Amino acid sequence: MIKIENLHASVDGKEILKGINLTIGAGEVHAIMGPNGSGKSTLSNIIAGRDGYTVTSGSITYKGKNLLEMSPEQRSWEGIFLAFQYPVEIPGVNNTYLLKAGVNARRKHHGEQELDAMEFLQLVREKAKLVELDPSFLSRGVNEGFSGGEKKRNEIFQMAVLEPSLALLDETDSGLDIDALRIVAGGVNKLRSSDRSIVMVTHYQRLLDYIVPDVVHVLADGKILKTGGKELALELEERGYDWVRQEAAA
Ligand code: ADP
Ligand code: MG
Ligand code: MG
């Protein structure tokens, strides 16, 4: 699905990513863990094409194409989805309206017929159930006045509607109480499929009890210092990150 090679990137002239290598196959779920400020959001944002970042060297190949040459819109049309660490509020812009525009822009890009209002309504109602999102949220402004947990749930709802090939979930678990966590994780699990890759950026092992990853990476100081199976998350929970740094330095 995606292959990142020796990626270096900076923000405001400061190097944040210092040689990232990461390959994710179709159908795989990867967790990226690491201390605050290590570059996890930077990596997710660069894949999604958010501006403000300068890639200074390295490459990203997505479905065989040079991702770095694609606009953020093209990336979205080609199936990349980013659930933000801090979802933005867009007061006055209807939640469903925005999604419909997104879905139809992508269909158009792929030469498919746009969904009409009825078809779309049917789609969003079905997907809202997946994350137990109350239908009243569909007609509200995007994240307008949503609680932290409701915003996160809305992000997964958007993911369900957009049916991405590569979903990047940046700390989707933060701000969720235990019931919401279970619901959101259940929604993500239902979206696991052999033609979709999911990247979960998280600080907490807790989420990984619900969404069991195939691979766990430790990103620290702008590099992936260690890669392992799901048991690595448990080890990090117990031992923290310093030992990984020491091991990598040795
Ligand atoms: P993480 O998500 O792992 O906590 P981030 O990717 O958010 O880390 O940040 C990595 C580093 O890049 C931090 O030192 C952060 O302050 C810096 N950084 C990220 N975005 C910006 C920005 N827009 N301007 C300046 N510094 C930034
Ligand atoms: Mg952080
Ligand atoms: Mg972050």
Image: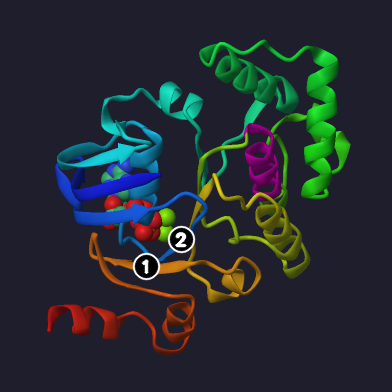
Report the image quarter containing ligand 3: bottom left
In the image, what residue type sits under mark 1?
Answer: His
Identify the image quadrant of residue 137: top right
Q: Is mark 2 within 8 Å of ligand 1?
A: no
> Where is mark 2, residue-wise?
30
The reply, left or right, for residue 140 in relation to residue 231 is: right
Left or right for 191, reference 165:
right
> Does residue 177 lie above or below 46 as drawn?
below
| Mark 2 residue type | His
Residue 91, given in percent of the width and then of the height, sits at 67, 26
Could you tell whether 128 is left or right of 212 in the image?
right
What percent of the width, then of the height, locates residue 62?
35, 37
Q: Give the mark nearest the N terminus, 1 or 2.
A: 2
Q: For the magenta stretch, what is the residue range?
A: 151-162
Residue at the image position 87 percent from the left and 35 percent from the top: 136
* Quarter of the rendering occupied by the N terminus: top left
Residue wearing tag 1: 217
As helix, strand or loop, the secondary structure at mark 2 comes to strand
User: What crowding class fits label 1: few (fewer than 14 Cα within 10 Å), some (14-19), or many (20 or more)?
Assistant: many
Residue 158: image quadrant is top right
Q: Residues within 10 Å of mark 2 (few under 14, many from 20)?
A: many
